[in-house]
Image (cartoon, rainbow, N blue to C red):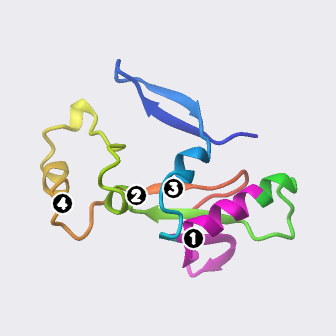
């Protein structure tokens, strides 16, 4: 099983691409990221904790290599502000139809505390509420 990421092409179509961890290997992996455990329900959601990106990638690799065992935690990276943590990486592009949206213009300013641009990712069998 593979993780699929939708990448915007020059023709503005979403093209599925196989996700590779090498993207993160060349960035600081000691950064804190929000993680949830899909097995731990917390009210109507999942309990969230902070871990180092390095630990999450190591976990994901081990979880996949062991065949996604049910006795391991089922961890999911949720609500990570990648563009805020790595502002020099130009990975977020506003789709043309939303380009003049005042919210995008407002939150694109670097001085704001929250950008409302999140990364969600996890191995096979993960989900979020």
Looking at the picture, tell me which residue is in the foreground, 29 or 17. 29
| Residue corresponding to mark 2 | 82
| Residue corresponding to mark 1 | 35
How far is the residue under mark 4 from the one under mark 3? 21 Å
As helix, strand or loop, the secondary structure at mark 2 comes to: helix
Q: Nearer the viewer, mark 4 or mark 3?
A: 4
Category of crowding for the residue at label 3, using alpha-carbon neighbours closer than 10 angstroms: few (below 14), some (14–19), many (at least 20): some
| Residue corresponding to mark 4 | 110
Q: Considering the whole magenta stretch, tell me its main secondary structure.
A: strand
Q: Is residue 81 magenta?
A: no
Mark 3 or 1 closer to N-term? 1
How far is the residue under mark 2 from the one under mark 4? 13 Å
How far is the residue under mark 3 from the one under mark 2? 10 Å
As helix, strand or loop, the secondary structure at mark 4 comes to: loop
As helix, strand or loop, the secondary structure at mark 3 comes to: strand
User: Which residue occupies 69% across, 53% down?
Assistant: 123
How far is the residue under mark 3 from the one under mark 1? 10 Å
Residue 120's disc number: 3
**Quadrant in which the N terminus is drawn:** top right
Question: What is the magenta range?
Answer: 34-61
Side (left or right) of 6 relative to 72:
left
């Amino acid at each position: 099983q593979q993780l699929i990421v939708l990448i915007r092409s020059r023709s503005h179509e979403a093209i599925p691409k196989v996700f590779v961890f090498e993207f993160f290997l060349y960035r600081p992996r000691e950064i804190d990221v929000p993680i949830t455990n899909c097995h731990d329900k917390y009210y109507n959601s999942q309990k969230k904790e902070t871990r180092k990106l390095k630990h999450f990638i190591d976990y994901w690799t081990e979880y996949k290599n062991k065949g996604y065992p049910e006795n391991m935690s089922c961890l999911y990276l949720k609500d990570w502000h990648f563009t805020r943590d790595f502002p020099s990486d130009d990975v977020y592009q506003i789709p043309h139809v939303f380009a003049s949206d005042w919210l995008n213009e407002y939150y694109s300013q670097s001085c704001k505390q929250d950008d409302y641009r999140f990364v969600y990712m996890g191995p096979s069998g993960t989900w979020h509420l």
